[in-house]
Amino acid sequence: MSPRGRRPGGEDTRAAIVEAARGEFAARGYAGTSLRGIARAAEVDPRLVHHYFEGGKSALFAAVMAIPIDPATIIAGVVLGPPEGIGVRVVRTFLTVWDNPEVQPALVGLVRSALADEVLVSQLRDYVYRDLVGQIVAAHPHARTLSAAEQSLRAGLIATQMLGLVVGRYVVELPALAKAPVDTLVERIGPIIQAHLDR
Amino acid sequence: MSPRGRRPGGEDTRAAIVEAARGEFAARGYAGTSLRGIARAAEVDPRLVHHYFEGGKSALFAAVMAIPIDPATIIAGVVLGPPEGIGVRVVRTFLTVWDNPEVQPALVGLVRSALADEVLVSQLRDYVYRDLVGQIVAAHPHARTLSAAEQSLRAGLIATQMLGLVVGRYVVELPALAKAPVDTLVERIGPIIQAHLDR
DNA sequence: GTGCTTATTCATCACATGATGAAATGTATG
DNA sequence: CATACATTTCATCATGTGATGAATAAGCAC
């Protein structure tokens, strides 16, 4: 009962499409990107985009921007260890993930597109708050004892700092931020996060 | 030699177009917004958009998003006064401008669109760095004595914080941030900016 | 080779977009 | 009223878009 016929060998063209799509989405956002533009960038017939990604543009976006990162794992690594070091661990972990050239284009594209679209932005909001920053605040021995409103505020302030870091370093690419070594940023920003949690 | 003919009285329809355009650009970004969509939202014939804004979409965007804010004036107000209060003044001034319902939609639309577009983002970069944060750093008695590289880094870190504030409070609209009163944010974030300048 | 399956190409559809032209309508001046 | 100009409407163009169908080429099992 082995499968007949030609094998789905076209792994290279599919990869070309994915790569081109990542680039386009990252540079132009979701609305500004066209399937034909992607095909052009990948030097491929536009029909192939539909062939490999049934469901069209949205499916392609979802497939290409599927981040191979489990937030729970990230959080787990950050939360482990002494509470007085959470700040620097957050920043370091964050930067390590984002500096990984494997996932950076996808993340940048995701943020660029999410910030420009009403429905995507609500998903981003939930993600940032519930899956990331909220977890961090809830894991800190002092911060977790605060009122719910105060915890939300702390989470918001931390989110502010991390969003700004992402936007400044990876989206807007402010020179000084984009060039700065990870250690420098950890050293400068880590304590800020820590202060939001401690005091 | 008084002008003959009908007066350009249609001030209301023009206003409707402007308002609709602001809303659309703010919600969908530049690429995601169509002239016909704007006309539809304004309940107006699409041709009128071209009639009132010659030059099409880009001209309309430029006209509608022209921010009635002079950065120099803003900076001047912030820089005046004791250096140890710059941090809180920056944050307060910033929030006051952005909370103004007159300009908020335009600013949000501008940021949303800028973050999704390659060429707009470079303008945003120059603006943030040269016209805003750079000026602040250069005006601080301690920070201005630092090396150029260090000044850039400080500016970048401050930009991080302010960008994050904007994105978090006005674009993503994280609940705790969006609801927080100005005083609270000034109190929490002001010292962070100050620390970037002082130490 | 024969048959089956996939990859690739070509052609095309219906639709939305930005843009422009021309006519019709309204409103002021003289 | 007649003229002049702005507003508004209607019609249309070329182009780009996402999407689909059909045909051809290529690889693998039998």
Image (tube, coloured by chain):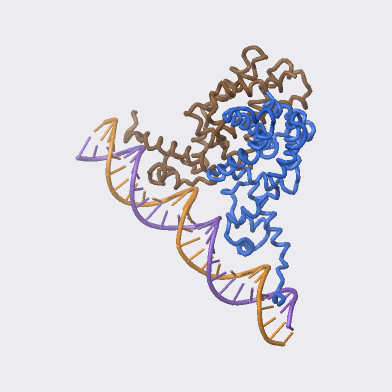
Chain colours: A brown, B blue, C purple, D orange
Quarter of the image with the C terminus of chain A in it: top right
Image: A136 above or below B181: above
Task: Give the residue at x 61% y 30%.
Answer: B151
Q: How many marks?
A: 0
Image: A173 above or below A81: below
Q: Is residue D11 left or right of residue A10?
A: right
> Residue A111: x, y in percent?
58, 36
Task: Give the residue at x 68% y 20%.
Answer: A194
> Residue A176: x, y in percent?
56, 31
Q: Nearer the viewer, residue A26 or C2?
A: A26
Q: Nearer the viewer, residue B52 or A72?
A: B52
Image: A91 above or below B16: above
User: Looking at the image, can residue A122 be seen?
Assistant: no
Q: Nearer the viewer, residue D29 or B75?
A: B75
Quarter of the image with the N terminus of chain A in it: top left
> Residue A14: x, y in percent?
40, 37
User: Looking at the image, can residue B78 be seen?
Assistant: yes
> Residue A89: x, y in percent?
61, 18
Q: Nearer the viewer, residue B182 or A142?
A: B182
Question: Splitting the image into 4 quarters, where does residue B58 fall?
Answer: bottom right
Image: A38 above or below B51: above
- The residue at the far top in this view is A82
